[in-house]
Image (cartoon, grey):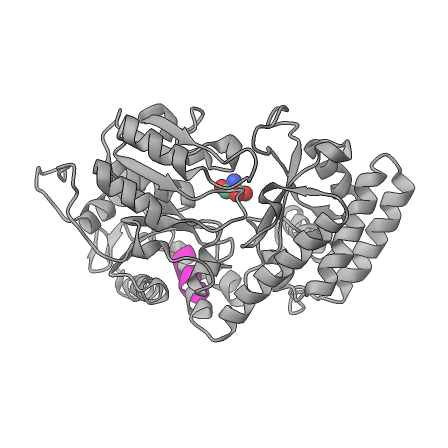
Amino acid sequence: MQKDRLVFDLLQKELKRQREGIELIASENFTSLAVMQAMGSVATNKYAEGYPGKRYYGGCEVIDELETLAIDRLKEIFRCSWANVQPHSGAQANTAVFLACLKPGDKILGLDLSMGGHLTHGSPANFSGKTYQAFFYGVDRETGLVDYAQLEATARQEKPKMIICGASAYSRDWDYARIRAVADEIGALVLADIAHPAGLIAAGLLNDPFDHCHLVTSTTHKTLRGPRGGIIAMRNDFENPFGLKDPKGNIRMMSSLLDLAVFPGMQGGPLEHVIAAKAVAFGEILSDDFKAYGQQVISNAQAMARAFVDRGYQLISGGTENHLMLIDLRNKGITGKKAQESLDRAHITLNKNSVPFDDKSPFVTSGIRVGVPAVTTRGLKEADMLTIVELIDTVLKNADDQTVIDTVKASVMNLMRAYPLYPELS
Ligand code: DSN
């Protein structure tokens, strides 16, 4: 461990940063030590192109057991008939789904990035928007809720082959049944990208997308609290409705086309050390404690949202049903960029975020996104959320006053000392 001083000193500094700060980035979390140990294990040494029982390398018998365990646990969590745990990230998982289901130039319909959607749901800057013809729905200007009427109208007019639901900055649950109804009307597939709320869905605290969506993708490192990575799953297998065939020209079930799309379609050797860590995280999700974690996440988020509203902050949609909230700072006279940078100086970490109908660029933004999965893992409760909001409010009101920011930083470090992070590590 000590051989490369430069790297290990930097890792010690990062551990210190994580320990001393308040982590509010909605897409981050703290894995268990067991998850990290699996990631730093001998499985990183093994090449295993292919799938359990069908590899292109020798010596895969143990890795096969590991990957099968991860798949089985994931299927149990979401009551699925099929899952693939090899995607290196959520973006890779979405790429594989598109590759398996669509032809270049096909139409897709997703939530606009500027309204809380994700880059891989058709943004012109991304492969999804360059390869497919992307159309978008948004949120209602008044309510901040997904504009399902607009989604339906665009779906009926454009007849996309795939409707994508899911978001990076949306604080409400989804009406998957309504999306499936219009998809059935026009013969489209529905993909739910549950990267953000997956842990809350696993805990049974939000609507279940598997009942209504043909395909589901997720990351594993957000509310699922696993290693950085991606997954694809389906509750029920089915034949590709668009007649796409495998490379040999055979019609195959979707599960088979998806496996082929991940490997050899768009990835090579799977990261088996990450898959081992996914298996550990999935085991933790299947434990009794995980539902309590999910409930605490929602309860903390709601306490925090109420505290922001009480201090005159404008939350998009007025509140939250999941782990995050999106705040429009225009009535507070500070941009998202300046808010993020000032809070960073006080060791409070979050990200600037465009708000719906934003008049500022994505590099500046009018808003911030605040999430509680990481602080909840550290053990913070509702009363702490009120303290955090008070600290944030003090910084945002004194963004140019270094003395005030230094005082807040001292309070942040003092608060977080009461919630040790990785005490086993020196
Ligand atoms: N952009 C990441 C986030 O939500 O933070 C997800 O890709």
Of 213 and 421, nearer the camera is 213
Image quadrant assignment for residue 111: top left
Q: Residue 423, how many percent across, how many down?
A: 67, 68
State left or right for residue 193 relative to residue 245: right
Q: Residue 12, how many percent across, how many down?
A: 68, 54
Q: In the rendered image, which quarter contains the C terminus?
A: bottom right
For the question of whether residue 127 can be seen, the reply is no
State left or right for residue 106 relative to residue 284: left
For the question of whether residue 179 can be seen, the reply is yes
- Asked whether residue 368 is drawn in magenta, I would say no
Residue sitting at the far bottom: 288
State left or right for residue 393 relative to residue 36: right
Task: Name the residue at 23% across, 39% down.
Answer: 185
- Asked whether residue 278 is drawn in magenta, I would say yes
Segment colored magenta: 274-281
Task: Name the residue at 32% across, 52% down.
Answer: 47
Of 404 and 11, nearer the camera is 404
Q: Residue 219, how many percent across, how many down?
A: 44, 50
Of 244 and 39, nearer the camera is 244
- In this rendering, the answer to whether 206 lies above or below 56 is below
Task: Name the residue at 24% across, 34% down.
Answer: 102
Task: Name the residue at 31% across, 64% down.
Answer: 79
The kind of secondary structure the magenta stretch mainly shows is: helix
- In this rendering, the answer to whether 227 lies above or below 192 is below
